[in-house]
Image: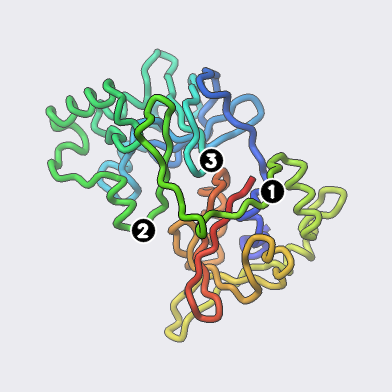
Amino acid sequence: MGTRTIPFLFLLIGLAAVPAVASPGERVTGTVQTVYEGDLVAVKIGAAVKDVRLYGADCPEIGQPFSDEAKAFVTEKVLDKEVTVELLTEDDQGKPVVTIELADGVNLNRALVRGGLAWWDREHTPKDRELRRLNAQAIAEGVGLWADPVSLSPWDYRRSHGLPLYTYRLESEAEVTPAQPAEEEKSKSVSAKGDMEYKRNFAVGAGLLRPDGNVDLDAVMRHQPRLVRGDDGAAVGLTANGIGAIAGSLGFRDGDVITAVNGMRITSEAQILELVNRFKNTKRFQVNVLRDGKPVTVPITLP
């Protein structure tokens, strides 16, 4: 199925529900399936594949120096290999925050910080003395990204480039409190249910799946996204056909043009694939739209 026939709302309702990696504090074995970035990988545990974020190690963002080196290091160490995963908490995007231990007992999170391939994430783990010590050692030796004494932290890079932000905390990191949205900005919850059956029924009700569970291709085509361009020919964002009834439950209106999702600007139909992969386990969205020519933000929380 080509990118032009991907259901517009699949990005937001997240039909593929994936079980949690484990309970907090539990250690399980799994196999790393994909390395997205140095600190973001997909792990298969049993039959489930889940994107996880590395605790305490914040690798350079794509476009920053040593981003490629961090990804290459992690790829060499864990891709297609069995590792031990410990779930510590979950970030505000619904991604498990974990430590990963290699077969030889090496802690991947600490190895990245010690090798100068990641910053100690002091915003979220200010009490982790070991990561702090390893970070200081890497700085003193000028290894990796610390060869540049004025390197920009990845969290500052994300803020300055309008990239998606995330936050998490541990019970032992009580002073690290995620910012709470103002009452009028709180995201609406689609439903308290979050299991696969609910989402399947939602899709059936939306007309995207037939009751037998097969994709209704005619319905998919009705939701075909299309690119909207400004008078200068530049891409403005995406809109879709006939989404009024479904979109209304999520806060959208017919005629809305989506210009960005969680800080990522929309410039092509093909970009939907990238968005689906990047945000497939994300529960909270800030969707920027143009409505009657005016910018509006639609906050969404998925179950």
Which numbered disc covers residue 250? Answer: none
Residue under label 2, please give it: 162
Q: Secondary structure at mark 3?
A: loop
In the rendered image, the quadrant that contains the C terminus is top right
Q: Is residue 73 visible?
A: no
In terms of depth relative to the viewer, which is nearer, 242 or 293?
A: 293
The furthest residue to the bottom: 231
Residue ID at (39%, 38%): 177
**Above-or-below relation of 253 to 89:** below
Mark 3 or 1: the one toward you = 1
Amino acid type at image mark 1: Ser
Q: Residues within 10 Å of mark 3 (few under 14, many from 20)?
A: many
Q: Earlier in the sequence, mark 3 or mark 2?
A: 3
- The residues bearing labels 3 and 1 have C-alpha atoms spaced at a distance of 16 Å
Specify how the rendered protein is coloured. rainbow
Left/right of residue 98 with respect to residue 273 in the rendered view = left
Task: Give the amino acid type for the residue marked by disc 2 in the picture.
Answer: Gly
At x 40%, y 26%, the residue is 77
On residue 94, which mark appears?
Answer: 3
Q: Is residue 60 visible?
A: yes
What residue is rendered at 57% in x and 28% in y?
Answer: 21
Can you give x and y, in whole percent of width and height, for residue 59 in the image?
A: 33, 39
Kind of element beneath mark 2: loop
Count of picture labels: 3
Q: Which residue is mark 1?
A: 191
Q: Secondary structure at mark 1?
A: loop
